[in-house]
Image (spheres, rainbow, N blue to C red):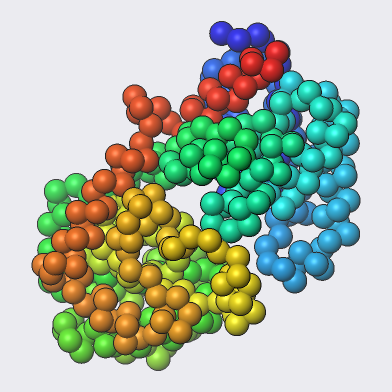
Amino acid sequence: MSGVGRHIFLIAGEHSGDQLGYRLMRSLRAAEPGIRLSGIGGEAMAGEGLTSLFPLADIAVMGFLPVIKRLPTLLKRIRMAADAVVAAQPDALVIIDSPDFTHRVARKVRRRLPNLPVIDYVCPSVWAWRSGRASKMRAYIDHVLAILPFEPAALQRLNGPPGTYVGHPLIERLDVLQPDPDDAARRLAEPPLLIVLPGSRRSEIHRLMPVFRDTLALVRRRHGDLDVILPTVADRQAEIEAALQDWPVKPRVVPEEAAKYAAFRQARAALAKSGTVTLELALAGVPSVVGYQVSKLEEAIARRMIEVPTILLPNLILGNNVYPEFIQADCAPGPLAEALFPLLTQSPAREAQVSGLKKLAHLMQLPGGESPSAAAARVVLQVMDKAR
């Protein structure tokens, strides 16, 4: 076992980082009892004993305009975080996701504590856009804990810092994602269960709900009855239900996570927005069609910056466009229905997706069944040992 009493400063910038952070804290303590952990986080990390330097809500801001409005506070918090790390003189700094905030802190810390090991938990999407960021990270990041299997090789190709694949947190949910025999039988029952996932952000609901509504109408016209479930989050349920009033095919709205995963295990197919949910669907083995729309301004920016042939994580991990994606003008009822209808029958299109998705869990799991948080803790301690 490594030395006792070492100190790690952790910085999470939003809810997803807080979730990673609390699991990492738990695994670090399991691997090295007596280790001291301090920093910035949310409720989950507080539950593991962290007293945050300031509330996570101060920095958990998404979107261009909200960031601009909160810029003075964000700059103040960046300085405060860097000053706190320097004052604490920890044995390592672990920054967790939210690169717009955490990387700015790391750069300030590196200038003042040049020998402090800095570990970045969650690789920024340098493989997808602004690839030049990777080589710049070498100046202030010593190691990257990657949550997607292809990221360490991408960092090496782009002359970025070294990285280790430590597993995506979703692989800890395989027991609730993958169907048992009863679930598999439900997938073949009639009417077929179809999951609709338009997203939880207001912009997604506004843009995708009408498109998905008309897509379902076209699919039912060809297939007949459908059993449709729309998972959402509790604070969007009323808004979603109001938007469903004019849907000719009415989904059952489920805000509970357990009901969502039960639907994933039993669904014949899914119509989903782009995002992490496509990885959940893929690990559950659900054939899917994916659509997404953004504003014209966001589209213009994305076309100039995105450097990958697909934006879907399952496709990127598999190295094959298993899930068809319909973006912007292509995200329309006709094309979506045309791609979705074959997935409701034993068609070649369905079989191709089912076959491709079977490889995904194997590619994402860690040797010996190690959990992502345990792997992340192991690598953090190895980096600290090497620095010492």
* Residue 29, picture quadrant: top right
The C terminus sits in image quarter: top right
Residue displayed at 76% across by 64% down? 67
Front residue of this view, candidates 106 and 227: 106
Q: In the rendering, at what x and y percent does residue 375 appear? A: 48, 28
Above or below — where is 186 with respect to 364?
Answer: below
Whether residue 45 appears in this view of the structure is: no
Q: Indicate whether 125 appears above or below 33.
A: below
Q: Is residue 218 left or right of residue 13?
A: left
Question: Residue shown at 51%/32% (left/top)?
Answer: 164
Q: Is residue 327 left or right of residue 378?
A: left
Q: Is residue 54 above or below residue 218?
A: above
Which quadrant: the N terminus?
Answer: top right
> Where's residue 92, x and y in %?
71, 25
Residue that appears at 79% across and 40% down: 107
User: Would residue 329 be seen by someone viewing this image from the given angle?
Assistant: yes
| Residue 373: x %, y % from top left | 50, 32
The image shows a total of numbered marks equal to 0
Q: Residue at x 48, y 35 (%)?
A: 165
Q: Position of residue 77 (x, y in %)?
A: 84, 48
Q: Is residue 223 left or right of residue 286?
A: left
Front-most of residues 247 and 292:
292
User: On the image, which quarter does residue 83 sit in?
Assistant: top right
